[in-house]
Image: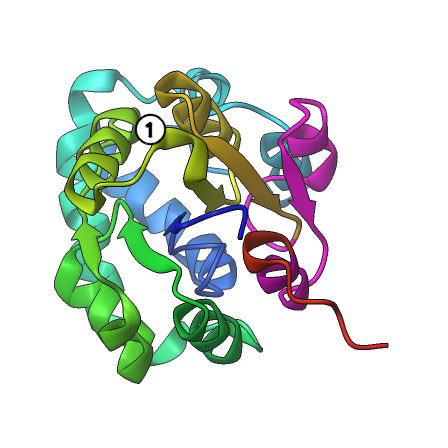
Amino acid sequence: MPYSLAIFDLDGTLADSFPWFLRTINDVADRFNFRRVADDEIEALRHASSREILTRLEVPLWKLPAIARHARRLKAEAAAEIPLFAGVETMLQTLANNGVQLALVTSDSESNAREKLGESAALFAHFDCAASLFGKPAKFRRVVRRAGVEPGKVIAIGDEVRDIEAARAVGIACGAVSWGYAAPAALQALAPDHMFAQMEEIADVVCRIPLKA
């Protein structure tokens, strides 16, 4: 088995929160006085890094903690509007059944994450939540240490450029999904170890289960 620990992102990877984000972002922009996002800017932003997005929207770094707290409150209120992607429960159960430890590292709160995951939350051995925009490397290191797994047996799976960058910063493999926030081309440009076009491919890569014909 190539990987013993799989660290997942939540929003855009397991939970289909991008439509909610698009409905919400300009209200948040008005509240915190940064630039609103026009419809014709969305695709360009999906190709940008986190730092580039902050620059384009004129968001100062010092506002990020307050914005994150506010976003977590809004997500809690909108939990019923944010479903898991199709196939998530089956994929996670397959990994767990094959002895893969599961961890969740997300910018969302643990309570929000558990509510979104529903019964699948019980499959996760490790939660490290409320990650800052650039705080995932430290959380990845902590999860790997707690799990007692060699870095070479760990994969982090996410949907943004910063997920790939965080995995590389701590020396673990990175998998990128094509159905989340960042455009697939932006992720492919960084040459992640694995690029997933379908949910079913994750189990195939993580625990080498052949895909059904």
What x and y, as percent, mark residue 193?
63, 33
Colouring of the image: rainbow
What x and y, as percent, mark residue 66?
13, 36
Q: Residue at horizontal 26%, vertical 45%?
A: 107
Q: To which residue does mark 1 refer?
A: 34
Classify residue 139 by image quadrant.
top left
Query: Dot 1: what SS?
Result: loop
**Eyeballing the image, is 7 above or below 170?**
below
Is 46 left or right of 171, judged from the image as shown? right
Q: Residue at horizontal 46%, vertical 41%?
A: 155
Was residue 183 drawn as part of the magenta stretch in this picture?
yes
Q: Amino acid at mark 1?
A: Phe
Which contiguous range is marked in magenta? 179-204
Instruction: Determine if residue 20 is in view.
Output: yes
- Residue sitting at the far right: 213
Is 210 left or right of 87, judged from the image as shown? right
Instruction: Determine if residue 57 is in view.
Output: no
Say how many tags the image has.
1
